[in-house]
């Protein structure tokens, strides 16, 4: 209820509006002034109105939840396609390692003829090599005795090549790659390296052709032992060294990461590679003996 006071005589009127005429002195409504308003105030609406803190907090919370729900739905909807893209990228890298253009990914099985997993002892174990490759980071987080390491056999230009995936750490995050060996299990025929967040123009150059091409023709063995490939600081430092390449200028830490990655991962394959090289040597000796025997027979016949 409102109270109005007559400015002429002081009469007090209670009501929603001033009277048309003062009952005491007869002046009009324009001579009344509002002196008190006890009318219940109307609600400002939900949570006190749009300008209230409660409304702002509630609105922000609802928007965050909605956006999160949309992003989660999009992620789930695209997860299958994302996985397909990851698998395609891995296949392209395997092909590139043996010099096959990525345009031939549809014929992946033509060039990557087989794959299998080995353990620390060099034994072939049951497992899907490509599936292990997709989770290679997790595999290297296991104890060496528990690891299943993938190995791929490729064929390009009529030559058999053995592809070993590698995984390690650079300056800012993980680095990974593939090393293709000739059928002597020592000479490198090609490599592919990549990274997650190395510095452009510096460490990121491990993914560039000038750095990767240095590895072709280098060998991972020296004096009968796997030594990997040293990455030496300074242009020309690796000249004449069949077990080394030049580091990236300004990318020393990433270069060292590549060196460490190669030797640490190759060590996991060492026993298997040694076994294969021993077989080759045995076959070579057997061939030599057969040639000698044949020569002796010919001489006796003469």
Image (cartoon, rainbow, N blue to C red):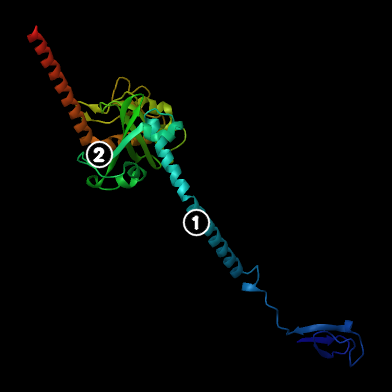
Please give the name of the residue rendered at 25% of the width and 37% of the height, measured from the top-left corner.
269
* In the image, farthest residue toward the top: 302
Residue, disc 1 = 72
Tell me if residue 192 can be seen. no
SS category of the residue bearing label 1:
helix
Q: Position of residue 105 (x, y in %)?
A: 43, 34
Name of the residue lying farthest toward the front? 301
Q: Badge 2 is on which residue?
A: 268
- In the picture, the disc for residue 297 is none
> Residue at coordinates 35% horizontally, 28% vertically from top-left?
190
Snapshot quadrant of residue 52: bottom right
Residue displayed at 34% across by 37% down: 257
Give the crowd class for mark 2: few <14, some 14-19, many >=20 residues within 10 Å: many
**Left or right, residue 22 beside residue 114:** right
Quadrant where the C terminus sits is top left
Secondary structure state at the residue bearing disc 2: helix
Quadrant of residue 220 within the rendered picture = top left
Residue 122 sits in quarter? top left
């Amino acid at each position: 209820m409102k109270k109005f006071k007559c400015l002429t005589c002081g009469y007090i009127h209670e009501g929603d509006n001033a009277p048309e005429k003062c009952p005491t002195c007869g002046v009009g409504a324009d001579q009344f002034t509002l002196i008190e308003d006890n009318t219940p105030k109307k609600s400002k609406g939900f949570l006190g109105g749009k300008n209230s803190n409660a409304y702002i907090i509630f609105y922000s919370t609802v928007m965050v939840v909605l956006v999160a729900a949309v992003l989660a739905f999009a992620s789930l909807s695209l997860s299958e396609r994302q996985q397909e893209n990851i698998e395609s990228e891995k296949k392209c890298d395997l092909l590139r390692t043996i010099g096959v253009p990525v345009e031939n990914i549809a014929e992946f099985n033509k060039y990557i003829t087989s794959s299998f997993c080995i353990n620390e002892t060099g034994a072939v174990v049951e497992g899907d090599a490509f599936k292990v490759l997709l989770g290679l980071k997790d595999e290297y987080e296991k104890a060496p005795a528990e690891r299943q390491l993938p190995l791929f056999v490729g064929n390009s230009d009529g030559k058999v090549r053995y592809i070993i995936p590698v995984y390690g750490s650079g300056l800012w995050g993980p680095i990974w790659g593939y090393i293709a060996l000739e059928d002597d299990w020592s000479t490198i025929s090609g490599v592919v390296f990549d990274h997650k967040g190395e510095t452009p123009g510096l460490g990121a150059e491990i993914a560039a052709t000038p750095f990767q091409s240095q590895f072709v023709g280098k060998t991972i063995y020296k004096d009968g032992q796997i030594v990997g490939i040293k990455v030496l600081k300074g242009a020309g430092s690796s000249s004449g060294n069949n077990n080394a390449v030049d580091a990236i200028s300004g990318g020393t830490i990433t270069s060292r990461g590549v060196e460490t990655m190669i030797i640490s991962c190759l060590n996991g394959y060492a026993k298997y590679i040694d076994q294969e090289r021993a077989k080759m040597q045995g076959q070579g000796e057997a061939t030599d003996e057969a040639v000698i025997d044949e020569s002796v027979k010919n001489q006796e016949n003469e």
